């Protein structure tokens, strides 16, 4: 069989590498396949107009490269020329719908943040419910049990001891990050604060009648529930009002100092009404801080003790001022 008997094939232009083969076999001036033709010229032209498969004069085997084997697990390619430099094989997929992140970072930050935030909110409200049960249990004891009232009246020093415990524990939790974040220290301080505050609130509530206390508890529960729903549903961002609330609190404290020396039913009603309104706004503010989400500012999920303390103080102050309004209006 002579060279002249080989059928002439048209010139082939590779769109990738632009390797130009001659007008027939053997290749004239083209890019020779790696390693030559091995056992000589193949017997007969390639079938289907392509290149001869490997083992009959085709290209070299599929390169092993850094993968060690075919990433698709299909062995050697059936035919054609071997991939040349410049052809980059895609890395294997890690699963259905997976994709690579060029920075190596996971793409589920928002989902994780929402999950953590929901768990944080549940923990805060569980702690808050425990505090309120202890507090209003103490209020009921001081209101409906005469023996407890007489005991406190005979031992007035307990009031000052409880006041000191409240001040010390609150300052420690507010100023020391390790105290409110480290377990079980944070729960110990929060428990001491709750018990002392419950005692003070029970002593204060014992000066009012039973119907007045029950009415104040009911109004406080309704107000706090309505404000919490409003804070979760409104599009108004109250977390940006921190500076305004601090300024209002300073004015309110100064007004309270003046009210100590200026006695009167009117000034008591005005002072208690302003206090109930101010701490109602604080309740919305602290609730949105805890929620996070689209609000400008949010509290860290690690600060669940601090968040529960803020909400607890807001509810307790609302109760005190509502009870003061009811008591002053009945005098």
Image (tube, grey):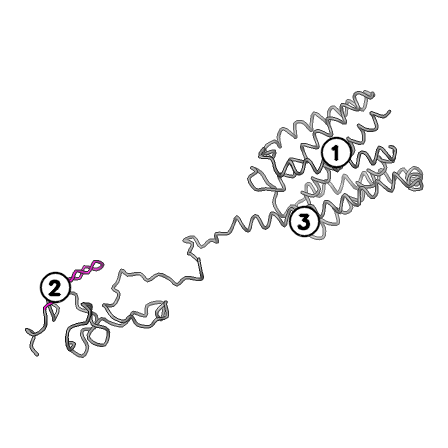
What kind of secondary structure does the magenta stretch mostly adopt? loop
Ranked by sequence position, the earlier of labels 3 and 2 is: 2
Q: Is residue 255 left or right of residue 210?
A: left
- In the rendered image, the residue lying farthest to the front is 48
Q: Nearer the viewer, mark 3 or mark 2?
A: 2
Position of residue 24 relative to residue 228, above or below, is below
Nearer the observer, 214 or 137: 214
Q: Circle 2 sits in a helix, a strand or a loop, which is it?
A: loop
Residue 233 percent location from the top left of the image:
61, 37
State which tag comes first along the sequence, 3 or 1. Answer: 3
Q: Mark 3 touching mark 2, by CB under 8 A?
A: no
x then y, percent, for residue 72: 36, 67
Tag 2 residue: 10
Residue underneath mark 1: 318
Classify mark 3: helix, strand or loop. Answer: helix
Q: Is residue 19 magenta?
A: yes
Q: Mark 1 or 2, which is nearer the eye?
A: 2
Q: Which secondary structure, mark 1?
A: helix
Q: Residues within 10 Å of mark 3 (few under 14, many from 20)?
A: some
**In the rendered structure, does residue 268 fall within the stretch colored magenta?**
no
Q: Which residues are magenta?
A: 8-20
Q: Which residue is mark 3?
A: 123
Instruction: Name the image quarter holding residue 214.
Output: top right
Q: Residue at x 32, y 68 (%)?
A: 65
Q: Marks 3/2: CA distance?
A: 77 Å
């Amino acid at each position: 069989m002579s060279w002249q008997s080989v059928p002439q094939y048209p010139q082939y232009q590779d769109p990738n590498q632009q390797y130009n083969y001659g007008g027939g076999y053997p290749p004239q001036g083209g890019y020779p396949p790696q390693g030559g033709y091995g056992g000589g010229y193949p017997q007969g032209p390639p079938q289907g107009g392509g290149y001869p498969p490997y083992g009959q004069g085709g290209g070299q085997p599929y390169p092993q490269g850094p993968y060690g084997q075919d990433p698709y697990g299909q062995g050697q390619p059936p035919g054609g020329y071997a991939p040349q430099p410049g052809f980059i094989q895609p890395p294997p997929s890690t699963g259905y719908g997976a994709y690579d992140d060029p920075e190596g970072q996971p793409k589920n930050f928002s989902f994780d943040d929402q999950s953590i935030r929901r768990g944080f909110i549940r923990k805060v409200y569980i702690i808050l419910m425990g505090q309120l049960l202890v507090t209003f249990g103490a209020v009921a004891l001081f209101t409906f049990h005469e023996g407890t009232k007489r005991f406190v009246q005979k031992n007035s020093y307990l009031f000052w001891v409880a006041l000191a415990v409240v001040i010390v524990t609150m300052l420690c939790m507010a100023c020391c990050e390790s105290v409110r974040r480290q377990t079980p220290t944070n729960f110990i301080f929060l428990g001491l604060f709750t018990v002392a505050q419950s005692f003070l609130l029970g002593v204060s509530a014992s000066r009012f009648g039973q119907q007045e206390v029950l009415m104040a508890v009911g109004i406080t529960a309704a107000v706090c529930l309505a404000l919490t729903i409003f804070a979760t549903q409104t599009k108004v961002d109250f977390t940006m009002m921190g500076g305004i609330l601090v300024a209002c609190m300073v004015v309110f404290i100064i007004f309270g100092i003046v009210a100590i020396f200026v006695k009167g039913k009117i000034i008591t009603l005005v002072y208690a009404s302003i206090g109930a309104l101010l701490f109602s706004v604080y309740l919305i503010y602290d609730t949105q801080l805890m929620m996070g989400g689209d609000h400008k500012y949010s509290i860290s999920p690690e600060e669940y003790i601090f968040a529960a303390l803020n909400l607890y103080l807001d509810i307790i102050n609302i109760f005190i001022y509502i009870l003061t309004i009811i008591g002053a209006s009945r005098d």
